[in-house]
Amino acid sequence: MEDKNNIKDTANPPDTINEANLLNSAELASLPSLYLALCRSAREITDPQADRKLRELVTRGAAEGVFPRDRFGFSALTRALQSADAFCRRVSPNRNVILAMLLYRMCDGQFLTLEQVEQDWGADVAKMVKGLLKVASLYSRANTPESENFRRLLMAFADDIRVIIMMIVDRLVLMKLINHHPAERLVRDIAVESNYLYASLAHRLGLYAIKSELEDMSLKYTDRQTYTDIARQLNERKAKRDAYIAAFIAPLREKLLSMGLNFEIKGRTKSIFSIWNKIKKQKNDIDHIYDLFAIRVIIDTPPEKEKNDCWLAYSVVTDMYQPNPSRMKDWISVPKSNGYESLHITVAGPEGKWVEVQIRTRRMDLVAEKGLAAHWRYKGIKSEEVLDSWMNKIRDLLEDTESGPMELMRNFKMDIYDKEVFVFTPRGDLFRLPAGATLLDFAFHIHTNVGSQCTGGRVNGKNEKLTYRLRSGDTVEIQTSANQSPKPDWINIVVTSKARTKIRQTLKERQNKSAELGREMMMRRLKNRKLEFEEAAVSRLVKKMGYRNMTDFFNEIAEGRLDVNDVMERYATFESHPHDPHAGKVSAEEFNLQTAQGEEADASANADDVLVIGNDIKGINYKFARCCNPIYGDDVFGFISAEGVIKIHRADCPNAANIRERYPYRVITTRWSGKVGSQMGATLRVVGNDDIGIVTNITSIISKEKNVSLRAISIDSNDGLFQGHLSVGIQDNDSLNALIRKIKTVKGVKEVSRAR
């Protein structure tokens, strides 16, 4: 172990003391008792030399004010000590977890780095500290689960189950500290989040005692009057309730002893939050809630006799008191997904009152109180089948990226608290699904491909539809077809998050493929008409036609619900005057020539005066149309666009006939001035044999030509032939024709032409 001097070398304390984080007199006075409490709780895992090293580091950090205060003003040091103590008492003593909870606060205060933690305390501790810092960074950006950070917060939790449990325990400590805190709104936000997120996680992990405390305190801070009223009524009835429990237990104890069982029996009042929920659900008052308490029989017995002894105790209870068969729950034969095991039966006790009796062994009770952590060794956790299953369910739920944070939160809580049904395959394999699950849910539970191709199934030998609601004990055989695929209405059939996510993913993939087909159809038609596909212009057209997005627009084209020829007409017009809502209804006199904006094939008459427009007018800015890319020497004409800019088209432009027919009043005569301007764009189409080196020979010719530059090249090869499009910068028509002649001399070239 390292001594105190080495600690000073590895830690890098700040140059100045942060006085805002220094402990006040009350906090200083509480430190010895908090530390002693932690020592008592962790005495079975103590290491005097390592503990001394940690104590010295923490003491120095406290003296230098490196433990930050939280939003409520509580010192991170006192809160960390309380959380570590609570973890040992409420979950299980573990050295690495205690180290992580204390060292994380010093890393958060920038007193230590993760590298120093790993070097001095090990990689496992550093991993947990990193997870805690990740969660802390999310909370620094948002305080409540309504934010978009909710999903990322859950994913940070799901990286390591120990981080989940540490955060649950820390939240329990915080909830106890904030009672009567003056920041009422902040307290309420924390209470709501504790109920939605932390109580739900505690329930999933089987930490029922912590879950009940969080729920009770959440109700207390959000509706203190209701909480106080229920607590008062329970307290007023305590003596009567205790007497009834004693009367119920006395004869039962004698009978169980006579059967040779070693056991403990006790009564337990339901939580205030649970009672409040029953009052709301049953629309009744507390006097008419029959199961305000439960009797718990805890049997000491070896593992091999657990089931036999539990069923023996069950027979004793049901012989003495009349059972309600509809409320019998066997969580011993098939434990809950979080490992919970117990027999529950509701019986009619003295005075005809219904009483719930829970029967379990000492081991089962430990799991029920401390959840999965009760039988969890922190190393090698990946091998735990139950934990792997739980982690996978959380990740499946988070995959549904279409859900907003509130919908995600609702589904998260629903998936956790829904009751379960158990169904079998024809081979006898048992599967667990939430109550209300359908045949389609079961198919997706088996495999995504099975669900996607599901057409129905046979349940207990009878054909059933996708919508069939599964019942415990059903034997289910799924029927599939290669021609089947998910439908949009399937979303309304399934209830599990996994099925819903997979259906949405498949529908989205199919929609994207259809949209891509529609896009290709439009681009092909545009190419035939010598028009370029411009994202900005298409986006404006999509919006003008009333579609929400391009995907919907292209889907309509692919499905044939939107005539692609009509789209071409609209696009040609829209591309020519995208901002003109009254195309064809305005006279030419209303248009004023303006300076062209942007970089699109701009040419300035002031620079070269290579064009004479109209009645020998020079010095006017214009644009060369992309649909035909005219160059010096071509027969051209001008077209006045809606924004008043002149676009120059070739006389044989594919759109020339349409423009002259629909907008003759916007056509303006144009001719070249006699001066050769700078390079202009032109595209050549080349067809030839797909021989080695032919493309190199073509580009070599272009590179040797004076005043010619190769701007872009695209080649498609098929069945021994290639077709390429070469975009070149060239001065005039004569130079282009000369270039075409030279390319035709290349061996293997069959055809060269100017693309229109």
Image (cartoon, rainbow, N blue to C red):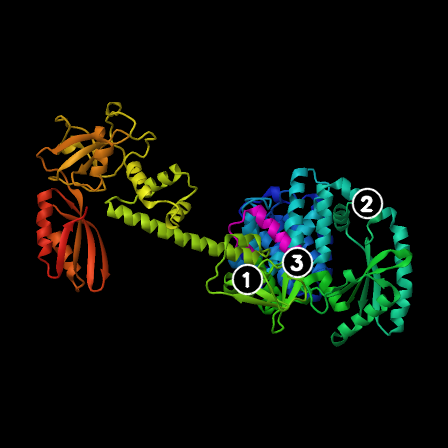
Answer left or right for 98 relative to 599. right
Q: Position of residue 515 (x, y in %)?
A: 39, 50
Q: Position of residue 576 (x, y in %)?
A: 27, 36
Q: Position of residue 182 (x, y in %)?
A: 69, 37
Q: Helix, strand, or loop for circle 2?
A: loop
- Among all residues in the image, which is located at the extreme bottom? 304
What amino acid is at disc 3? Answer: Ala
Contact? badges 3 and 1 (CB < 8 Å): no
- Residue at 23% from the left image edge and 41% from the top image edge: 626
From this view, report whether residue 408 is shown above or below residue 88.
above
From this view, report whether residue 251 is shown above or below residue 78.
below
In this figure, which residue is indicated by the disc labeled 2? 285
Upstream in sequence: badge 1 or badge 2? 2
Q: Helix, strand, or loop for circle 3?
A: loop
Residue 423 appears in the picture as rendered: yes
Contact? badges 1 and 2 (CB < 8 Å): no
In this figure, which residue is indicated by the disc labeled 1? 444
Residue 435's label in the rendered image is: 3
Packing grade of label 1 (10 A; few <14, some 14-19, many >=20) is many
